[in-house]
Amino acid sequence: MAATRIDGKALAAKLKENVRGEAASLPRKPGLAVILVGEDPASRVYVTSKRKDCEECGFYSEEYALPAQTTQKQLLELVAELNGRADIDGILVQLPLPKGLDEREVLLAIDPGKDVDCFHPYNVGQLTIGAPVFQPCTPGGVMEMLKEYRIDPAGKRCVVLGRSNIVGKPMALLLLHAHGTVVMCHSKTPDLKELAASADILVSAVGKTGLVTADMVKEGAVVIDVAMNRNGEGKLCGDVCFEEAAVKASYITPVPGGVGPMTRAMLMKNTLTAAKLHQGV
Ligand code: GUN
């Protein structure tokens, strides 16, 4: 295997340790409220890990597990209440929301100063003009990994597979701000394979097991796998055929143990940022 395996777990632990140290020096503990509506099992797992991360970082956390029948009005009322709470610095509404709830309206209702997911249009706008208050967690985590391994996107061809609001779009923006030449590919891109194979840095965020095969990886490319899929045996895996891609790549992220832990660490970092803002530190 030629590639260096990027250790997201170790880097996330280091980031969280720094966050814990800074949090301890604040007059008041950072506080995070996480709202989960409905019974999606994957979301349940994410929310439980967020609570654990808060404990590790010395944060105060609250979890609201609401039934799938929760109305838009009830959800908006809870967000409004949390917006007004002085001990809550960050509000995270776990997505996707059950059918019938208007995700956009809910995200718009979150105080932009507490929007630690960086999903509010105000924060998306700040990100777009290159002046973000919060880093979008998953793409921000990817940028931290590149920095740690001294991979500079400047002058490189960066190909992003997937155009979601959570990953693909903000990932493209961060790479662009880092002076990469960015190509975004999606389900309607006719020559996706060729474009992927031209990437110096390839980021896959599609959610399709086995999508990225060795012929889509340029010799020496950096391969970042953002996806969290389950294969036929229920095992967690990404979009990239890891073993075969690793033969050609220079650096590659595993799934699990790559981008996932970094996303969580970035959420802690954003909550710390919010707490500092709220406490005037
Ligand atoms: N669902 C999948 N990823 C995320 C995330 O980063 N934040 C929230 N709120 N929901 C998600």
Image (cartoon, rainbow, N blue to C red):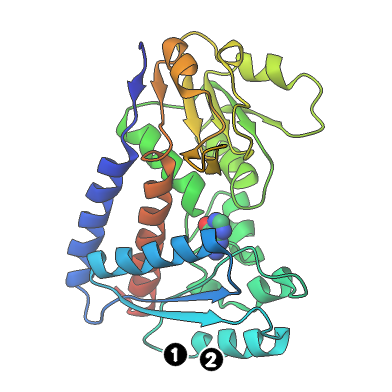
| Rendered-image quadrant of the N terminus | top left
Name the secondary structure under disc 1.
Answer: loop
Whole-percent x and y of residue 83?
52, 85
Decide if residue 3 is on the left or right side of residue 40.
Answer: left
Residue 85, numbered label: 1
**Image region (quadrant) for ligand 1:** bottom right
Residue on which the image places disc 2:
81
Residue 180, numbered label: none
Q: Nearer the viewer, residue 106 or 276?
A: 106
Whole-percent x and y of residue 37?
59, 75
Tell me where residue 169 sits by quadrant. top right
Tell me where residue 69 sits by quadrant. bottom right
Specify few, some or many for label 1: CA neighbours under 10 Å numbering under 14, 14-19, or 20 or more. Answer: few
Q: Nearer the viewer, residue 23 or 106?
A: 106
Tell me where residue 30 sits by quadrant. bottom left
Name the secondary structure under disc 2.
Answer: helix
Q: Is residue 101 above or below residue 203?
A: below
Q: Is residue 118 visible?
A: no
